[in-house]
Amino acid sequence: MTRHDVGKVAARRTPSLFGRKSENSRVEASPRREGVVISSQVLGNFRKPWSVDRLRGQAANTREGPVDERSGGRLHTAVVAIGQPRRAEDWGRTVCTACRDALDGVDSVGLVLHSTGFLVDLVGCSDSLAEQAEDAQIVVGEGPGPSAYSTGTVVRATAGSDAFEPWPMLAHEAARLGVGAVIALPLRVGGLRIGRLDLYRRQPGGLSTEVETDAMLLAELISYTLIEDFALREPGADPLATTHRDVNIATGMIAAQRGISLEEAFLRLRAFAFAAERSLPEVARGVLERRVDLDGATE
């Protein structure tokens, strides 16, 4: 399979921005890939009756009892981390680390946003396992995470079963990285999908019902927090800090140099990373430093 073929496969398998839109909503992708612009009318619909503050209060109220005692108060710590300023460079990593520590049986966590077409942005990871696993899913364009985003439902996959069969290009990478199981939760508010929260286990098997319920609540909190953040962002304000800054800049550079769309530029970046068996950030840095030519020439 050539790089071009890989790119076409990835494009077909990666969902479009947010799925369906209601007639009275305005959802646009920023041309600089800085996130999502949502009208104040849509924000008003989200905040009545389900506001971020109400969800945080609900979390605080439910974690004062035996549930938070079970996690040693770590669920409250995760809720606090989610509420911290999203412009901080380490917000994504802090949230992922807090979620990992709060959820018994979870070894690693990744937070990913989906943007226009098949553009994807890695907001943060708790550790190197999540970084490598997320890079693999983004490069091949398939896996439990993308499936959770496209379907809007929780997707579970565990090693030693046929659960990874729908994603043959990812199965090898999962085994190589030592991923025993993945529980991918969509980030969504109603029918509006914005990304996913991926939970990784080194051992095969799922999570308990109680822990998965806690994970769903954290994913919901993240979803509402980011939606409100996007909607209230002032024009020209700093974008949400992500770990894929070099990837974003390289994508824009390729698009400008070749006169192609951001989607096609990102697709070419992914195809090169797949063919060269290198991580997406590594390839992006090579492009920025003029060491990598996507047509195949490297120094």
Image (cartoon, rainbow, N blue to C red):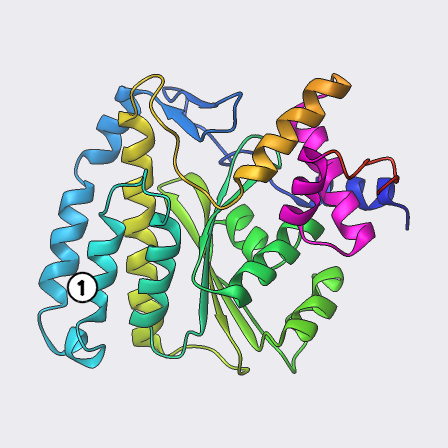
Q: Residues within 10 Å of mark 1 (few under 14, many from 20)?
A: many
Magenta stretch, residue numbers:
260-289
Q: Main secondary structure of the magenta part?
A: helix
Using the rendered image of the protein, determine whether residue 241 is visible from the camera's viewpoint: yes
Q: Is residue 17 above or below residue 14?
A: above
Residue 284: in magenta span: yes
Q: Position of residue 247 (x, y in %)?
A: 60, 39
Left or right? Give the position of 157 relative to 34: right
User: For the point 47% across and 78% down, which residue is it?
Assistant: 206
Q: Position of residue 226 (x, y in %)?
A: 33, 40
Q: Closest to the observer: 279 or 118?
A: 279
Instruction: Tell me the element at label 1.
Output: helix
Left or right? Give the position of 40 relative to 258: left
Q: Is residue 126 above or below residue 28?
A: below
Q: Position of residue 251 (x, y in %)?
A: 65, 31
Left or right? Give the position of 244 relative to 214: right
Q: How many marks?
A: 1
User: For the point 22% across and 57% down, which residue is it?
Assistant: 79
Q: Position of residue 259 (x, y in %)?
A: 74, 16
Find residue 117 and report its image quarter: top right
